Structure formats: C-alpha cells, structure tokens
Image (cartoon, rainbow, N blue to C red):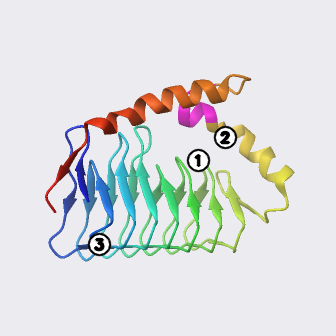
Amino acid sequence: MLLEHRGQAPRIDPSAYVAPNATLCGDVTVGPGCRVLFGAVVTAEGGPVRLGADCIVMENAVVRGTPKDPVDVGDHVLIGPTAYLTGCTIADDVFLATGTRVFNGARIGARSEVRINAVVHLRTVLAPDTTVPIGWVAVGDPAQLFSPERHDEIWAVQRELDFPGYVFGLERSDTLMPEMTTRYGRALATHRDDRELPS
C-alpha cells in the first residue's frame, strides 16, 4: 500500500521490489535494488525515510522517520524480520538481525552488526565494525555494551539521554503519560488525511 502523507508520496526506484502488503507512507525513498518484504511498514512520521541501494527490509519490520530525526539507511543494509527503527542513521553494510530495536537519534557505523533482539538506544553512537551481541543493549555516545540483566548500569547511562525530553519534549513527571499520549495522538491523527495511491 502506498500512502500520501502530509502532501508527500513515496518514491520507489524502478529496480526495487515492494511486496503487495507492505506499507510505504509519506516522504519515503526506496533506492535501486531494494526489497521491502511482506508486512513491512516504512513511514515518514513528519521526517523522511531514505533507503539506499540494495537494502532489504524483511517481513514485518517497521522503519519510522520523525520530525527531529529522519531515517537515513545506507547501501547494502539488511533490516531483519520484526526489527523496529525510528529516527536513526544507519551506515553502509550494516546487519540488523531479527527483532532488533534502534531508537531516535542513534547512529550505527559501517559494517556493524546488531544481533537478534539487541537494542541500540536513544542517541547512541556505534563505531564502525561494532557488534552488539544477541539480546544486549548498546547505550551512550560512544556506545557502551551491556547484557540485559545489567539494568542499573544501563539506566545510569540511559537516564542522562532523557528519552521523554528528547523524543516528546516533555519532562519526567506524574503526568508524563497523559501528556505524551495526548500530544503524540494529535500528531498521529494527521494520518486521517492520508490518501491511498495506485501501486
């Protein structure tokens, strides 16, 4: 499904393949030789998404651009099944395995591997040739790598990255969730005006 969002329509190189039940929404550029497979969602939520040449977006992956952080994916990148990327920059020749999560403002260097169910957190910078092991968490700039049971150490770095402030412009408080869902809900309501395009 191709959707025009906020007056922007996806652009797909003629040599690319987009599965019939994938969704491309808004200011999305799909480069030459790309493959966007079944159930994948590539959506420009106020910020563009660019897939370079020969990228593969596997089944049910989500790639989401944001107003503060567009998504820019280099060439020869594989985004695994059920991966979730939002507002991040991915250099060339990167492997993002099944179930990986890459958050707003993150930057992943060339030839890096983020293995199954690993997380690259908000505003985290992975140097080229970095491997994040299965299920581990990368956090900080430069990135520190932690196994998931080291939550207190992860939080010590993550807290300073200020997820609600950076992503939503809100302070942590007792009213964070009502404020965040109201504000984010207003932004997402712009999809009511999307227009389906012929594929």
Q: From the viewer's side, name the closer residue of 6 and 155.
A: 6
Disc 2 crowd rating (10 Å Cα; few below 14, some 14-19, many 20+) is: some
Q: Which mark is residue 138?
A: none
Can you identify the residue that label 3 sits on? 19
Q: Locate the C terminus by quadrant.
A: bottom left
Between residues 103 and 188, which one lies in front from this camera angle?
188
Local packing at callout 3 (Cα closer than 10 Å; few below 14, some 14-19, many 20+) is: some
Name the amino acid type tagged 3: Ala
For the residues marked 2 and 3, what is the alpha-carbon distance in whole angstroms?
37 Å
| Secondary structure of the residue carrying numbered label 3 | loop
Image spot of residue 135 (x, y percent): 71, 69
Q: Under tag 1, what secondary structure? A: loop
Give the labeled residue for mark 1.
123
Which of the two labelled residues, at mark 1 and mark 3, occupies the earlier sequence position?
3
Please indicate whether residue 13 sits to the left or right of residue 105 in the image: left
Q: Position of residue 166 (x, y in %)?
A: 57, 35
Query: What span is in magenta?
Result: 164-170
- The image quarter containing residue 45 is top left
Instruction: Give the crowd class for mark 1: few <14, some 14-19, many >=20 residues within 10 Å.
Output: many
Which is nearer the N-term, disc 2 or disc 1? 1
Position of 44 compared to 30: left or right?
right
Which residue is rendered at x = 54% and y = 52% of the image? 106
Query: What secondary structure predominates along the stretch shown in magenta?
Result: helix
- The residue that label 2 is drawn on is 161
Circles 2 and 1 in contact, beta carbons < 8 Å: yes
Please identify, in this view, whether the residue under mark 2 or under mark 3 is nearer the observer. 3
Residue type at tag 1: Arg
Q: SS for tag 2?
A: helix
Label located before the other in sequence (2 or 3): 3
Residue drawn at (40%, 53%) of the image: 71
Question: Which corner quadrant of the image does residue 145 belong to?
Answer: bottom right
**What residue is rendered at 50% in x and 26% in y?**
183
